[in-house]
Image (tube, rainbow, N blue to C red):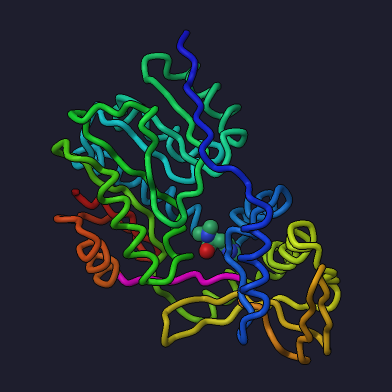
Amino acid sequence: MPTPQFIQLYQHDATAVAQELLQGLNAPQAFTSPKYLYDALGSRLFEAITELPEYDLTRTEAQVMRLHADDMARCVPSGACWIDLGAGNCEKAARLLGPLQAGRYVAVDISVDFLRHALDSLQRQHPQVPMAGVGTDFSNGLDLPGALDLAPTQPRVLFYPGSSIGNFTPDHAVRFLRSLHSACGSAPGSGLLIGVDLLKDAAELEAAYDDALGVTAAFDLNLLLHINRLVGTDFAVRDWRHLSRFNAAQSRVEMHLQARHAVRVRWPGGERLFAPGETIHTENACKWTVTGFDALLRSAGFSSTRHWTDPASRFAVFWASA
Ligand code: AVI
């Protein structure tokens, strides 16, 4: 029985993290990177979000994959090396490895500790598919480690489901997609399979990011507790409220934490006073049209694209050939 290979590249640098967070908190419009939403509790709250009636992205993407599996199998090369970005519990790729005949599977996430359990059990289900887990922060571009020893002649399928690309600004998205294009390598047939949430009614989008149960509010507010641990700030959750706003000019839902009254936040060596109503911008979720996303893929270097949607055209999955 083969065992997966594990490679941990990312090393937590407490000073660099604190510097990055304080730079954002001190900016005229305070902001934080959405990656800090995902501590252990944040990751569990995100899983709960995917079950909410208002948040249909995850369910609709799964529906698109199910409805169009046969057509996708005709586009995606068989025997390919699948590189699953943000793999987590490897659940989404697990449904495709068999039907799309993967020849190798590489799960990528910030820490191999998130991957070990899922990869060990996936390996038992597919003993013939060599598997590896890579712990790396790929948010600023994907760099695959030489230790994977990827075969130059084996086609690669970069798999980036979940519309996480929506959490990048368009400029950042194009730079990131360029790095995925080069990670496709030079074997013919390689490409990117990516899920994208599509533009829809503003009220519906705002509700998807501000559900009636308050799970998304908890997910956003939990960021403050995470920052307290990372930077030594003294944020009190009760001083803040969660906001979800659709910004039509930028075609994105924005999440903000808004000060309920004047709030002084202190940390070792500094402080900031937030006026009543002032916000910290915590996440963008860009919503694309099919033509807009197609153009983005092409400007990142991908040649031809195919896409599939659900019957109501709420979500699209694109196959972009390298
Ligand atoms: C992970 N990402 C695609 C989610 C989204 O829809 O932008 C994160 C999220 N934020 C609030 N709800 C879900």
Query: Seen from this angle, which residue lies furthest top?
Result: 1
Left-right relation of 235 to 292: right
- The answer to whether any part of residue 267 appears in the image is yes
Q: Position of residue 233 (x, y in %)?
A: 80, 67
Residue 54 visible within the image: no
Residue 119 x/y as whole percent? 52, 27
Q: Is residue 280 above or below residue 144?
A: below
Q: Position of residue 220 (x, y in %)?
A: 69, 67
Q: How many marks?
A: 0
* 186 vs 277: above or below: above
Q: Which residue does the image show at 30% across and 31% down from the upper left?
A: 81
- Tell whether position 164 is magenta: no
**Magenta region:** 282-289
Q: Which residue corresponds to the image point at 60% horizontal and 36% vertical from the top-left?
A: 114
- The chief SS type of the magenta part is strand
Instruction: Give 69 or 77, whichever is nearer the viewer.
Output: 77
Where is residue 221 drawn, in percent x and y? 74, 67
Residue 313 image-quadrant placement: bottom left
Which residue ends up furthest to the front in the rendered image?
Answer: 269
User: What residue appears at the point 50 percent right and 43 percent down from the top-left corner?
Assistant: 136
- Residue 214 vertical placement versus 137 (above, below): below
Let me know if residue 286 is in the magenta part: yes
21 vs 304, left or right, is right
Drawn side of residue 221 relative to residue 116, left or right = right
Residue 189 lies left or right of residue 2; in this view the side is left
Q: Quadrant of ligand 1?
A: bottom right
Vertical arrangement, residue 157 with respect to residue 37, above or below: above
